[in-house]
Image (cartoon, grey):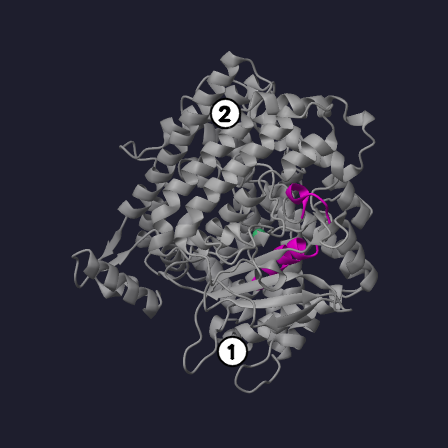
Amino acid sequence: MKKIMITALFGLAIAACSGDKSESCENPFLCEYNTPFGVPPFDKIKPAHFIPALDEGIKQQNAAIDSIIGNTAIPDFENTIVAFEFSSELFDRVYLTFENLRSCDATNSIDSISEEIIKKVSQQNTDVVLNANLFNKIKQVYDKKNELGLNTEQLMLLEKTHRNFVRNGANLNEEQKERIREINERLSLLELDFETKVRNETNAFQLVVDNIEDCAGVTQSLIDVAAETAKARGLDGKYVFTLDRACIFPFLQTAKNRNLREKIFKGYISRCDNNNADDAKKNIAEQVSLRTEKAQIFGYKNYAEYVLEDKMAKTPEAATELLLQIWKPALELAKKEAANIQSMINERGEKIKLEPWDWSYYAEKIRAAKYDLNEEMLLPYFSLDNVLQGVFDVTLKLYGLQFVKRTDIPVYHNDVVAYEVQESDGKLVGILYLDFYVRPTKGVGAWMTEFRTQHRASVKDKKTLENKIVDVRPIVSLVYNFARPTADNPSLLNLDEVSTVFHEFGHALNGLLSDCTYPSVAGTNTPTDFVELPSQIMENWAFLPEVLNMYARHYKTGEAIPQNLIQKITESNKFNQGFNNVELVAASLLDMAYHTRTDVKQIEDINKFESDEMKKIGLISEIVPRYRSTYFKHIFTGGYTAGYYSYRWSAVLDADAFEAFKENGYFDKTTATSFRKNILERGYTDDLMKLYVNFRGHLPNAYALLKREGLQ
Ligand SMILES: [Zn+2]
């Protein structure tokens, strides 16, 4: 995952600080940092510093904008677009530091100022984007963009800046602006309401089991949790299973009692579809209608068109076509998988027809029989230290990068380790913080974020007093939630977690190797359907036999992982992929169906809409889309609206891109250098499809993904 920050909408202009140098300077944000590499002085920053520094940042940005507007010279790229790009340097630096701490070390004192900070930031963003005089200057530059002799990166920055204003309503008349404001306000309420409803319904469901016999098959650790949950809910002596991911999915995989599997599964898929106060169907109908109306006010046919214009896919048609390339073979394979499961059921003499609540249970039986692989066998070979060494070694072999631990760099928490990343000749690439362990003040999941985005800044040379261009190197951070080592054992990772280490490292490389001029188009500031390419491609190296031989060693004996285990890991990759892809693509197509509607009239029957769409694509009755409409938070609480396709789109890209390494050698220098030069260094400084083709030599197609996941 790549953390998406709501910074000042445009710039992530995090230049090296040049503030007050006096000793008496009390707020570290307003002083020269005086730290190695200009990293934030975490040892000096206190929660009380954020709000005054943010206020000062807002003041500075407003002054910079006033001087752009007040400039009597003819507006040009430098005096308008670049001036605006760097207008929010302090504002972004303070807010980014705050947001990062709020996500990974939300102490009470940080939490207590969150609301005020978020309010200030959103107010400032709105003020900027609705500033008609500022837009007027930007538009004057935009209207003559082809006469200015701009290079590709400058054109991309100009397009992006202009588009951000336009997409927020700058070109609309007053009446339209008013309606957009109303729609946005209403949508944010509806999204919040949707989120609350899903949370309520998820929490409201409980499967109460009276007898331990009915828990047959379920692991002891899950039974223990269920007993504790029951106790906490005043149901001492019973077992309570919930819709928590860590509970329902293992339950469905292991519980022998079919009726109970059916109950919990139906509880899960009928969330917010129970015709009660938390039913979300009306909410969905209104959201879809408002979005269509909004898109049409902006002059688009439908909402997906409005969203995708800004993405690599560019049109809903392109996204849908790619989804269908996966859908057809995935559906064929899923039908075969269903038939396999049914014959296993028949062989066991169980007289039932396969239903959605049976799939995971029997699929696990088949997996166990076929691959004889379990977590206990694997864990000892994947200590966190060994996996980290593995990803360092892969990065060294591909890009020549070296990681030097630095204990003199201030960090925001004792868990965090700082590295100086260097090219093979020792030249600075950037700073990398690694924050591995779970703690109560940290959000769930894993993500990459930055404290400073790479860019080039114009600074005055202290001796010559002349301006020179300085390459400001990035400060990147990776945050995970792994178990802490104990007195006896190091932190041991399962295969998913190993993948996650490599995945986030790919985002880090995208940030670290960035070689751009303007921060808002640098590094990972790319659209959602492209940003996961650098991360997902790294996962491909994690389990290659030659890479496992490098790093997967028993934490006690140092013995390399046995070859038969490597073989099983490789083979089990293709297991159940028909099901996985059908689930994912069905949900992606459902999202597209809602957001390619052109009729503003509200959908009358959401369930009928969903089932009609699923019928159209031929979804089989044994599989339910990954998310049904009424709890599809990705698309109805913002973020991935008309964008759920991004996950499969990026997977197509990463599989196709990795083919180049398969063809030329997993550590082929020429291929790695081309990936670095065309993708990792380039941010959003050119058309993304063009950059991709420059690397790969052809447009992406789903063939490699289909092959990798056994769909063809
Ligand atoms: Zn990611």
**Percent of width and height locating residue 483:** 44, 69
Q: Quadrant of residue 198?
A: top left
**Percent of width and height locating residue 213:** 25, 65
Q: Viewed as shown, does residue 272 lie left or right of 128?
A: left
Residue located 46% across and 52% down the image: 27
Q: Which of the marked residues, 2 or 1, is nearer the chain's N terminus?
A: 2
- In terms of secondary structure, what is the magenta stretch mainly? helix
Residue in the foreground of this view, choosing between 231 and 437: 437
> Which residue type does callout 2 highlight?
Arg
Q: Which mark is residue 105?
A: none
Q: Is residue 313 in the magenta section? A: no
What residue is pinned by disc 1? Answer: 380
Q: Viewed as shown, does residue 349 lie left or right of 576?
A: left
Disc 2 or disc 1, which is closer to the eye?
2
Query: In 3D space, how far apart are the residues under numbered discs 2 and 1 (Cα atoms)?
Result: 50 Å
**Percent of width and height locating residue 244:** 36, 53
**Bounds of the magenta segment:** 501-522
What residue is pinned by disc 2? Answer: 291
